[in-house]
Image: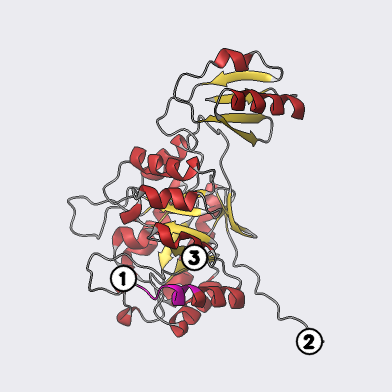
Amino acid sequence: MLVVMSTDATRDQVARVVQVIEEMGYQARPMPGAQRTSVGVVGNDGRVDGSRLEALGGVAEVIHVSKPYKQVSREWRPENTLVTIAPGVVFGGGEIPIIAGPCSVESEQQIVLAAQQVRDAGGAALRGGAYKPRSSPYAFQGLGEAGLKILAEVREATGLPVVTEVVDPGDVDLVASYADMLQVGTRNMQNFPLLQAVGGVGKPVMLKRGMNATIEEWLMAAEYIAQRGNLDIVLCERGIRTFEKATRNTLDISAVPIAQRLSHLPVIVDPSHSGGRRDLVLPLSRAAIAVGADGIIVDVHPYPESALCDGPQALVESDLRELAAVAAHLSPLVGRTLTPAPAVPREPAVA
């Protein structure tokens, strides 16, 4: 349920609505907007008497949210949610950030080189997995906390915010202490204890669509995160599993506008895991920008031929520069601009 306040509602009237909702045994979530404030009723089991709220001063209307996912729906919040992971790096607004980096952190040298390439090409954030869930138990699983420390050191040197995956609820606090954004991968989209844990840690979350998940299931997974009070969620379409063998996955490009119509959360695209081939990343990125995606995340590796994870789909430096140039050219055609690389941190002055 959503209580929409009138445009001239006072703070005291909003506070009174919150008080009454809590007296009824539910949680209240005030949501200030550009024109008016709305107050969401959390924990509503369908038996809330809306007439008691409609009678309060300053209330314009009470809306019953019909979607099974409540807080991430457009009914709950008509305006787009803007998710900021670092100063100047915002998803869901007028700019399109590019997140780039290797699928997994292999060494300090590898990450330093990759970060330099990402910055020089105009990327807005660095990705890299310190923990990697793999299909084979014998494949490289990541460096763990040592990889997180490397990412944090590179962030200090380059100014690039860090996006990294978390796979275990017990690791959430540790990963959050190093990362600017937590990634929940396709295999963990319905790991509900993990979703609840990342929802309660106070960091932005990127939620990748499960390879076999419907759009509704994807949004329901996001609801688990939102239930813990965190609406800083970026949805990521990364391709779904179909009968087609020519690509690693099938990019569901229609999922972008559909999810944006159903939800106020930003939606980005992962063309690397969709196509699974380096030569497909650029054309799929073009499609993502044209359809209105709020960002792109791509694999980049300084030495793809020796990568321990997903080398065939990783871009090299020249590929990333071409992608950034194409993104900068296409973005204005859809009313947007490309997010510039963050400023390089200054060295402290020597006394």
**Residue type at tag 1:** Asp
Label 3 belongs to which residue? 174
Residue 313 sits in quarter = bottom left
Which element type, helix, strand or loop, lies under badge 3? helix
Q: Quick check: marks 2 and 3 in contact, CB under 8 Å?
A: no
Label 2 belongs to which residue? 350
The x and y percentages for residue 307 are 33, 78
Instruction: Categorize mark 3 by other alpha carbons within 10 Å: few (<14), some (14-19), many (20+).
Output: few
Q: Quick check: marks 1 and 2 in contact, CB under 8 Å?
A: no
Instruction: Categorize mark 2 by other alpha carbons within 10 Å: few (<14), some (14-19), many (20+).
Output: few
Quarter holding the C terminus is bottom right
The x and y percentages for residue 17 are 66, 24
Residues 342 and 59: in front is: 59
Q: Nearer the viewer, mark 1 or mark 3?
A: 3
Q: Which mark is residue 310?
A: 1
Specify the segment rendered in magenta: 142-148
Mark 1 or mark 2: whose residue is earlier in sequence: 1
Measure the C-alpha gap from mark 2 to mark 3: 33 Å
Which element type, helix, strand or loop, lies under badge 2? loop
Q: Which mark is residue 250?
A: none
Residue beneath the point at 42% across and 34% down: 69
Residues 268 and 55: in front is: 55
Residue beneath the point at 60% across and 64% down: 340
Q: Quick check: marks 1 and 3 in contact, CB under 8 Å?
A: no
The x and y percentages for residue 208 are 39, 53
Q: Is residue 183 above or below residue 233?
A: below
Measure the C-alpha gap from mark 1 to mark 3: 25 Å
The x and y percentages for residue 296 are 46, 58
Residue 40 sits in quarter = top right
Residues 39 and 284: in front is: 39
